[in-house]
Amino acid sequence: MSSISIGLTQVQLTELQASNLFNRDLAPVPPDRRKWRLGSFAALWISMSACIPTYMLASSLIGGGMNWWQAILTIFLGNLIVLIPMVLNAHAGTHYGIPFPVYCRAAFGTKGANVPVLLRALVACGWFGIQTWIGGNAIYKILSVFIPLLASSTPPSFFGITLAQFTCFLFFWGVNMLVVYKGIDCIRWLMNINAPVLIVLGLLLLAWAYRAAGGFGPILSQPSAFDPGQPKAGHFFTFFFPALTGMVGFWATLSLNIPDFSRYACSQRDQAIGQALGLPLTMALYSFIGVAVTSATTIIYGQTIWDPLDLLTHFTNPVVLVVAMIALCIATLATNIAANVVSPSNDFAHLAPRWISFRLGGLITGLVGVAIMPWRLVADPSGYIFVWLIAYSALLGPVGGILIADYFVYRRCRLNLVALYQPDGEYRFANGFSVVALIALAVGVLPSLPGFLVQVKLLDAARFGQFFVGLYHYAWFIGFAVAFVAYLLGRKVTSLMRPTVALDRPQAVCE
């Protein structure tokens, strides 16, 4: 087992309790509370990956012209790439027991850390609302099979959904808030029971589709639209790289705030191998299940059904419907809590540690998730990859580049744990803000800005060269690399200009 930082002593904890940067939820996790082993991290990723958005993820790629294996391979490759910053950023959480917001203080400053923290939190609030809507809608659609009157309601003009849909949404929202109230140990328990159940149910659904259709149907036999003689021949890479960026963006959020989980790890080995086993393979497997089952529906029902909720409404056995509803709700709940509540709960707590706890941060996340009316966000799926996933990856990629450059290259994995909680410590920089990190963040985002503005139709593509507009399709990669280099150059320049106050180069302690 690799070594783990012992955290703060009791004397240091007592001294820092008066700090406005400290509360019990942001404090380093002591060794006796670090109980997550390899299986816990594998279960975490299986639980988060086995969800409805993953099931439907390949559909957008196939709709864009890929055949089934090109789509699955793109998904697998994207998750293999994002696994690298995931494991690297997890290192600080495991070694020092600190959450993502505290980790950000070393690079961005004690106050400047709120910039990446809020960027991550707002994205999470959007995802929380979307996942909660999916879970509530699952309950609604299954209940509509038993009570057809629910499906005949007229939607109110303001909300755009029926009262029954809104009630199911709020019910599922309440279940999410209950789990948040119970705390991190309840979340770990939910992950551990959820993972094997979802894998078994997914494979059972795959077996049913194969048997009922006498095979997997036409989608698995259709050629790629990019093959010679097909409508998009010769344009494969024009579509592939933006799609790959979108696949990286799918979990770009967790690649930043993974310290929120790795702080509970028993060792670096547990978090690294557990994540490697749980993430890429599960994403590829569940995406394949979605493609294969959808392909089979073309034969079974005479229509292509990508949404698993719509597929379930074709079943008449009440036992199957109830079991499926429970399974889908548990799957969505597990993904939502782990991916979209833990991080923003800590992030909002970071804004005012003396006043906002993990539970209150979770409640704020939940309220914002309702206020954004997520059913409107998912009403138009056309921009799912090219607007939603790529746009926020353009913001989060640079943050990841800065954090990894600071922790691994500039500081060589050495942090002053006490100073991370001191308003006037070495991470105060300029009144709490690291100008170098903020400039590097802006520089990292800038190359993708023209393409984003063109994508959302705020600017005409003719005003920019095709080269600059096209950079948006590589947003995460370019943002990460540019911010990484810009941050290290900025630190170098700062050290040369102010050698008397520059931080000493620490000895390497990376494990």
Image (cartoon, helix red, strand yellow):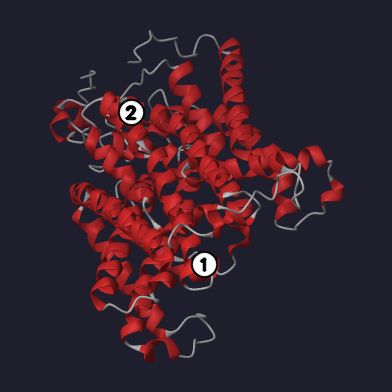
- Report the residue marked by disc 1: 298
Please, is residue 165 above or below residue 64 in the view?
below
Mark 2 neighbour density, 10 Å: few (under 14) some (14–19) many (20 or more): many
SS at mark 2?
helix
SS at mark 1?
helix
Q: Nearer the viewer, residue 275 or 263?
A: 275
Between the C-alphas of marks 1 and 2, the distance is 40 Å
Side (left or right) of 80 relative to 511: right
Q: What's the residue type where badge 1 is placed?
A: Thr
Q: What's the residue type where badge 2 is placed?
A: Ala
User: In the image, what residue occupies the spot 43% across and 61% down?
Assistant: 214
Please, is residue 349 above or below residue 433 in the view?
below
- Taking the view exactly as shown, the residue that stands out farthest to the front is 214
Q: Nearer the viewer, residue 190 or 261?
A: 190
Q: Residue 391, position in %: x, y?
A: 60, 48
Please, is residue 385 above or below residue 442 in the view?
below
